Amino acid sequence: MREDILGRSRVEDTDELVQFYRRLETMGAGALWTVANDIEPWYPQPKSVPMLWRYEQLRPSVLESASLVSGDDAGRRVVMLVNDGRKELSAAVGLLYTGLQIMNPGESMTAHRHAASALRFVIEGEGAWTIVDGDRLEAGARDFLITPSGTWHEHGNDSASSPVIWQDGLDIPLVNTLDANFYAVHPELHQQPGKVVNTSLREYGSGILTPADRGWSKRYSPLLAYPWERTYEALLARAEVSDGSPYDGIIMEYVNPLTGGSVMPTMGAHMQLLRPGQATLAHRHTGSVIYHVAKGCGHSIIGGQRFDWQENDIFCVPSWAWHEHANDDDRNDACLFSFNDFPVMHALDLYQEAAYTDNHGHQTVEDTLEPATTVQQ
């Protein structure tokens, strides 16, 4: 147990100490110095590892699931993405969950709610809809939607011929770790939506104006749907007047239009654009991130390992892992959607960030990894 660094536990085990530890265990107690070096590390030591999930490999299994189980029997028909270092939590990275959900043509599911917050990023198909507290939201590819904690919601697919697939993102591992999760099915099984579709988008989605009679007091965004077309236009407009971030290119956050804050108290979301051929500098931060390739192709270097990605692939960056991104297309831009636990980090004053200063800001690549493989930190 001895440590050579001053100030850390340097106690060496003896027969007498071992007997002492055993007596403490019988009393539901323990000696702090035996675990201090593990529970108080010099810097974050995440259990999660960087991973890449290729959509073209996962898609056949997602489609197969639609014929194996019904949506209502399964509760939610989702192929979840599990980090090799976080299997016990069913987490994709840190305390974040993600998965691929499929809805068959004409299918709908019963309404429910839970303490965990949720978000959706539509991948493919037409006819996707969700109803959140009575607001029917219709969505297409690359649209982003939120289902805040405690809101009644249900999903469906109005298409007569093709399934829809979207990515779910939730803070289930966080809420479960806090022993604070609840789940309930709507007493009438389905909601009665209002007459106007995408009400929140019509009321709060102008981008430059918000209602003057602000009656919204909830901690999540009153805007529940963020269309891709407006998102991409905003990125292109920003790119005309700004060089963007040296670490993330042109990056913009989906926000609560009334406060400018994150869309939900526990999860934030961004969309970023990498110019043709652009390679960012490396940095790291506390907080975990799950990325979805919304457009283009390229690669990211995470913890010294290279991950090549293309449209609809998903990858993760654990907390405090060095990472940088590159667009491998010299003619077209690339866009990365991401969601994170930054709001939690900021709320608890735990957010820190650092730039990589060696090798002109770029990591030395140790290896190129195949998808669904891991990197030990």
Image (tube, helix red, strand yellow):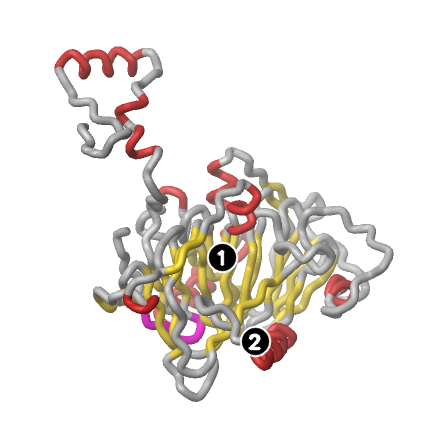
User: Is residue 217 a member of the stretch shown in magenta?
Assistant: no
**Residue positioned 21% across, 64% down in the render:** 366
**Residue positioned 28% across, 29% down in the render:** 7
Disc 1 packing (10 Å; few <14; some 14–19; many ≥20): many
* Mark 2 vs mark 1, CA separation in Å: 42 Å
Region in magenta: 307-312
Disc 2 packing (10 Å; few <14; some 14–19; many ≥20): few
**Residue matched to label 2:** 242
**Residue matched to label 1:** 77
**Residue positioned 40% across, 82% down in the render:** 277
Relative to 308, residue 16 above or below? above
Who comes first in sequence, dot 2 or dot 1? 1
Q: Disc 1 residue type?
A: Arg
**Secondary structure of residue under mark 1:** loop
Q: Disc 2 residue type?
A: Ser
- Residue 239 appears in the picture as rendered: yes
Position in image of residue 244 (x %, y %): 52, 72
Relative to 344, residue 177 above or below? above
**Residue positioned 86% across, 56% down in the render:** 213
